[in-house]
Amino acid sequence: MRKNDLQFDVVIIGGGPAGLNASLVLGRARKRVLIIDNQKPRNRVTQATHGFLTRDGVSPSEFRQLAKEEIAAYPSVQFAAETVTDITGREGEFVITTENSGQYDAKKILFAVGKKDKHLEIDGLAEVYGKSAFVCPYCDGWELKDQELVIIVRAEHALRMAKLISGWTAHYTLCIHGDDSLQQDHMQELTRHHVKVYDTPIHRIVSEEGMVSTVELTDGTCISCTGIFFQPTLQTGSDLPRMLGCEVMETGTIVVDAQGKTTVPGVFSAGDAASEMYQAITAASQGALTAVSINYELNFESWNMK
């Protein structure tokens, strides 16, 4: 590649729905775009993407492939299957370095790095994650409708999750995870609705080929079920936003304004990295809206330089 082939209007770090949709919008706006993606999405453990009109039920890998085929119509958008290790410079003069010693120049940066799960501390949970244990009922509740479920949840979210899950099944048990206890009024309300609640720690999850059959507690109690919903502990998908100076909340969410701007000039974020909605279609929408903001800035800056 020649030197000018390494210079971009926008480098997008992360190739999920947010980054892909942003590149589509920017490509159609005739901007030079590079998507750098390490191809390790959080949803790679799942078998299907749901709730995305015209793409309901496709696998995450198929979703990405279809997106890339559409984006290929816009030759100013390029892809690099690499991992970014460092970013230096400032707005208009960013230098992005990858682990393969590649270097790219960019006027703007868009972090679409999503979030990643911290260690799944319950024995057996990793084996069922994405097969019969899920984190989002809007994504996977339909497939588990009317089944016997176990909801693994922290005490402060137990009542809210009970109300939410009740729309998909009446057959579920709450297992309180963590050191906190249920508030008395919450416990009373759950009891009135005949919801079973256990606060004994989970010993392990029993499964075969990814399909859960039993949740075993440390006191020997065994809860039969065919599905699980749980609340993972998340962190930002990359340390780069924080290293660059972006404000990041304790939840791992990058702080942005309504246009997707972070606290660092020239740096934007969209999708799960900058939101706690965790829906593919929401991430794609945020990617598109943030791309509009980026394009607006680039056009105005170019205009003012003439």
Image (spheres, helix red, strand yellow):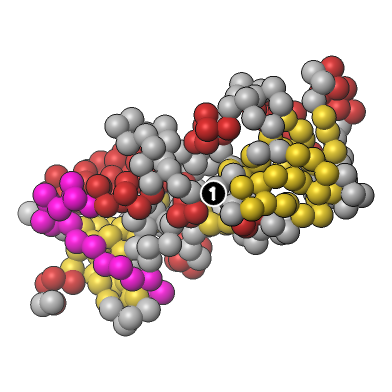
Q: Is residue 72 left or right of residue 128?
A: left
User: Residue at the bottom extreme?
Assistant: 101
Which residue is disc 1 drawn over? 130
Q: Is residue 124 magenta?
A: no
User: Residue at the top extreme?
Assistant: 192
Q: Position of residue 10 (x, y in %)?
A: 25, 58
Q: Is residue 241 above or below residue 17?
A: below
Q: Position of residue 121 (x, y in %)?
A: 71, 59
Tell me if residue 41 can be seen. yes
**Which of the pair 125/187 is nearer the observer?**
125
Q: Is residue 86 above or below residue 272?
A: below
The residue drawn where x is 41% and y is 41% is: 49
- State which region is magenta: 68-87
**Which of the pair 189/202 is nearer the observer?**
202
Tell me if residue 304 can be seen. no
Q: Position of residue 5 (x, y in %)?
A: 13, 71
**Which of the pair 196/184 is nearer the observer?**
196
The residue drawn where x is 43% and y is 43% is: 48
Quadrant of the frame with the C terminus: bottom left
Under mark 1, the amino acid is: Gly
Residue 89: quarter of image:
bottom left
